[in-house]
Every structure is written in C-alpha cells, then in structure tokens.
Amino acid sequence: MSDLPEPEVRLATIAREWARIGVIGFGGPPAHIALLRRLCVDERAWLSAQDFEDGIAATNLLPGPASTQLAIFCAWRLRGRLGGAIGGLCFIVPGLAAILALAALFMAAHPPTWVRGAAAGAGAAVPAVALSAALGLVPASWRRVTDDRAARTRWVCYFLAGAAAAALVGPYLVLILLVCGLFEVASLRIPRTLSGHGMWALLPVASVPVTGGLAALSWVALKVGALSYGGGFVIIPLMQHDAVTTYHWMSGTQFLNAVALGQVTPGPVVQTVAVVGYAAGGVGGGLLAALVAFAPSFGFVLGGAPHFDRLRSSTRAQAFFVGAGAAVIGAIAGAAIPLGREISHVWQLGVLAAAVGWLFGLRRSVVPAIVGSGVLGVVAALAGASP
C-alpha cells in the first residue's frame, strides 16, 4: 500500500462524508462498500482502486464488522490514526442513535399494539435473513478453494461443522471456527501457530461466563466485537445464548426483534448488541455495549493497518481464512434454527414464508423484507392476531 496521499483531506471533510454514509448506509456490508468505493475511488480519487481492494481483502481477514473496519481503514489512509478514529465514529454513530431510539420504542414496558405487531412481524423474517446472508457469502468463499477434491471436501465439512455448532452449541461456536481454521492450516502442512494473530488467543475463553451486571454486559459485547469473524451474524447464536439463556436480559422474542432492528437501521448488524445492552441497562447499557463491541475494530485497524500487506501475503492467514470462513458461512446459516425456534405464533410462519419468497424467489434485498414483514405484523395485530 502506498504512503498517505497528498494533499491531506480535511478532518471536517472526513467527518461529514463518513457521517453521510452512516446515515444512508442501509443494506449491510455490500451497500457500505459500494458507498465507500464511490466516495474514495470514483468521485474524489482519494484512493486508487488497488488500495481500496487491498483494504477490503485485509479487513476481511480480521474478526469484527468488516465494513466498519473498511470505513476506519479508508479514513486512516487519508489522515492517519486521528482520521481513522473520526471516520469510524462518524460512520457508526448515526446507526447507533437510530437503533437505540427504536429499542426504546419496541422494548417499552407497554408498547402499543401496532408496535408489538411490527416487532413480531419483523422478527419472523429474521431466520430467512440469516439464510440469505449465508448464501450470499458462499460464491466468494468457494472461489478461494482450489480445484483439489480434498480441499473442496474439507470446505463442505467446515460449512457443516459451523452450521451444526450454531444450531446446537451456540456458546462454543467460536471454538469450532478456530478448529476449522487451524485444521485447514495443518492440512496444507503449514505450522499451526498463526504468528501475529494474538487476537485468536481470546477464542478458548469465549464461553467463560461472567457474573451479571455491567461486567457481564461488557464481556458479551467484547466477544461480539472481537470474535465476530466473517460478520456480525456469526456471533448471533452466542449473543442469543448470553442475552436470553445465561443472563435473562431479554426474551427470545425480544432477541428476534433486536436482530431485526439491526437489519433495518444503517450500519453493521453488530449494532444488535446495543439493543441487548439497552435491555440489560437502558440507554447507558446500550452505549456501553456499543463502545466495547466496536473498540476491537478500532484497535485492529488503527494498530495493525501498517502491517496489512504482510497479513494479506501470509499463507498461514489465507489458509486459516479458508477454513474458518467456510465454518462462518455455515454458522450464519445454522443460526436460522435457534432464531426460528423463537417464533411463537402461527401467523408468523406465514410472514416467514413471505420473507423466504421475497429473498429467495424474487431475489430482492433484506431491508424491504424486514420492513414489509413488520407491516404484515401490524396488519395481523390490528386484525386481532396475538402479537
């Protein structure tokens, strides 16, 4: 990657443009990447196309929300660490404000009937969204595998292992991802130690419980931010187990609503953790959860960006990504099972079927699916169905 470009971009410009993307960035990582490319490469020519693609490749090798890390990286390339910090914050804050406002509405003690109906409808579509997210990642991951039959067989096994782990043993999911990645490294006769990747030392303790309160909320948020390898959806089973089963901050139905809110607001699905934080401790809990969850992304990029070239050229890292990446995709697909189990009303199955038809039959985008499902929920609730 080349040195920082000249002349320097003003910090105020970074703040304004990254906040604008944070406001209009509906549609998840593909939308965020497209908006950043249009701004930094096509319109302003701040970065070359090669630098931008290098940034995508490097941030995809890191745990955490990749599009957020790409936003931080692009701002870092323009104005160093201060620019990266400002750009990342401005990218995150609009979605965070929106999701906390919606959490206050949807998780009120006695919300109106239409709100409860919208929540139930949107939540019913979430399992379909998880499957859609997984299938969308399959082609790129499959292309990384060589034509060797054994390599492709291993990929399928990693996928199935991730799916089974998400469906059956959510709290230990990250351990399965680690094993799959290391197995792929070992299969290529590369030393098992992934030097320079000390972040993975967190994985063996990912399922260790912490006593309740702010310490527990911070621990859950840290796992979300530091271990969401391959995107926010992969951490959903672990977050669901902690928020619903271990600490009882919210019901399973409320967790479905939280994931839905993470989809309909701009920004990464990792911001779902802010809704969990709101359930645990109000607005302060939501802000704390978001702060802790996004802190690893800033640390990884602002501390490690100068070394991204070495990371991308590492055969060990690439091999680990192939194995863990396939397991991640399986885990995202497998997350549909525990999410689907939280559907509690028969009419929601019809909404789920409509979402499946929209996403897979018509091949349309996620945000309209969630919003449309919410509208169907409102209609059902006002017609007398139990929300």
Image (cartoon, helix red, strand yellow):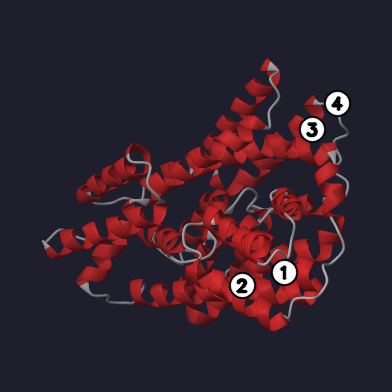
Q: Nearer the viewer, mark 1 or mark 4?
A: 1
Contact flag, marks 1 and 2 (Cβ < 8 Å): yes
Q: Amino acid at mark 1?
A: Ala
Mark 3, secondary structure of its residue: helix
Farthest residue in the left direction? 383
Disc sitting over residue 185 in the figure: 3
Task: Report helix, strand or loop for mark 1.
Answer: helix
Q: What element does badge 2 sit on?
A: helix
Q: Residue furthest top?
A: 149
Ranked by sequence position, the earlier of labels 1 and 2 is 2
Distance between the alpha carbons at the discs numbered 3 and 4:
7 Å
Q: Quadrant of the N terminus?
A: bottom right
In the image, residue 302 sits, relative to residue 153, either above or below, namely: below
Q: Say whether residue 214 is visible.
A: no
Instruction: Name the spot of residue 47 as percent of width and height, x first.
Output: 74, 61
Question: Which quarter of the rendered picture does the C terminus lie within?
Answer: bottom left
Query: Disc 2 marks which residue?
Result: 18
Q: Position of residue 228 (x, y in %)?
A: 63, 53
Query: Which one is nearer the viewer's eye here, 150 or 24?
Result: 24
Say if 77 sits above or below 350 in the image.
below
Say which residue appears at 34% left-offset and 53% top-offset: 369
Q: Secondary structure at mark 4?
A: loop
Which of the numbered marks, if any, corresponds to residue 75?
A: 1
Q: Dot 3, crowdedness within 10 Å: few (<14), some or many (≥20)?
A: many
Asked whether the beta carbons under mark 2 and mark 3 sit within 8 Å of each other, the answer is: no
**N-terminal-most mark, 1 or 3:** 1
**Residue receiving disc 4:** 189
Can you give x and y, in whole percent of width and height, for residue 158 in the image?
63, 31
